[in-house]
Amino acid sequence: MLRVIHAPNFSMQGRVALLTGAGRGIGLGIARALASAGCAVAIQDVDELVARDAARKIEDEGGRAIGLGGDISDAKVVASLPERVVQELGTLHVLVNNASIQSNSPWIEAKLEQMDRELRADLLMPILLCQKCVPYMRDQKWGRILNIGSIQQKQGNAGMMSYSLSKAALEKMTMTLANRLARDNITVNLIAPGYFDTVRNEKDRPRMAEIAKGIPVGRIGQPEDCGGIALLLCSEAGAYITGQSIYVDGGLSVA
């Protein structure tokens, strides 16, 4: 019989995480996974009532959570989030950049104003959040940044060009910051979801069974499918992983 010499430490006891766009879907799936391991979570969503309701449900399950509202494309809102988390939860160890804006139209018809808003929310605001959160992580000599990309950072999508571009750039940002922050005991990684059953894809529900046939594992992703890898990357168990993009897509990116 093998003797277990070292078991990975997935505990998040004493840690505090800020998750953007986490009132529902993949963000909430990650928040629940972190909370289940003992992490206090600050759930941000553009709809504050949705954020508070999600936080309340996590607390009903035995976790510790708060809900925060605000438009993630607004720099003033974004810049204030880390301080609000520290005021309410005492500190900040983990940032999950999950919020994004996604529009769908032929690239040649895309409006400049919409592209500008998407790029701000999906790329520039995550960078700003990193700038605001890293000082807290450096003070504690421990931190985790988890960016949520997309399978489209690899495949591209002419109907969602600014979204695809922002996710590709987010991958490069992940690599750059991982190199800069490794000496501070801060890891920076990205998970790239494929096709998931979320509110954003609700319009596709009637044909999801057909869509699933094109995914190697034979099913649509569920929000909790991102929870396990997120917990690995945000806990001590993932301390030697940084600068990586991991696809959570049921094999779709290699199909």
Image (tube, rainbow, N blue to C red):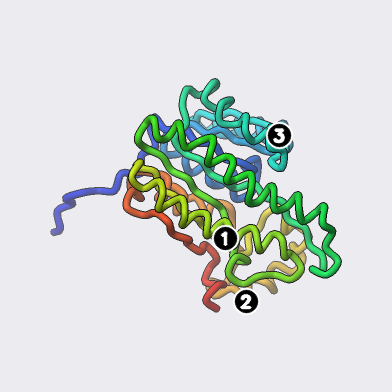
Residue in the image at 57% along x and 60% along y:
193
Residue tagged 3: 70
Answer above or below: position of 67 versus 245: above
Local secondary structure at mark 1 = strand
- Crowding at mark 1 (Cα within 10 Å: few <14, some 14-19, many 20+): many
- Badge 1 or badge 3: first in the primary sequence: 3
- Crowding at mark 3 (Cα within 10 Å: few <14, some 14-19, many 20+): some
Q: Is residue 159 left or right of residue 98?
A: right
Local secondary structure at mark 2 = loop
Badge 2 amino acid: Gly
Of tags 3 and 2, the one toward the viewer is 3
What is the residue that sits farthest to the bottom in this orientation? Answer: 255
- Badge 1 or badge 2: first in the primary sequence: 1
Q: Which mark is residue 214?
A: 2
Local secondary structure at mark 3 = loop
Q: Which mark is residue 193?
A: 1
Residue in the image at 55% along x and 60% along y:
192
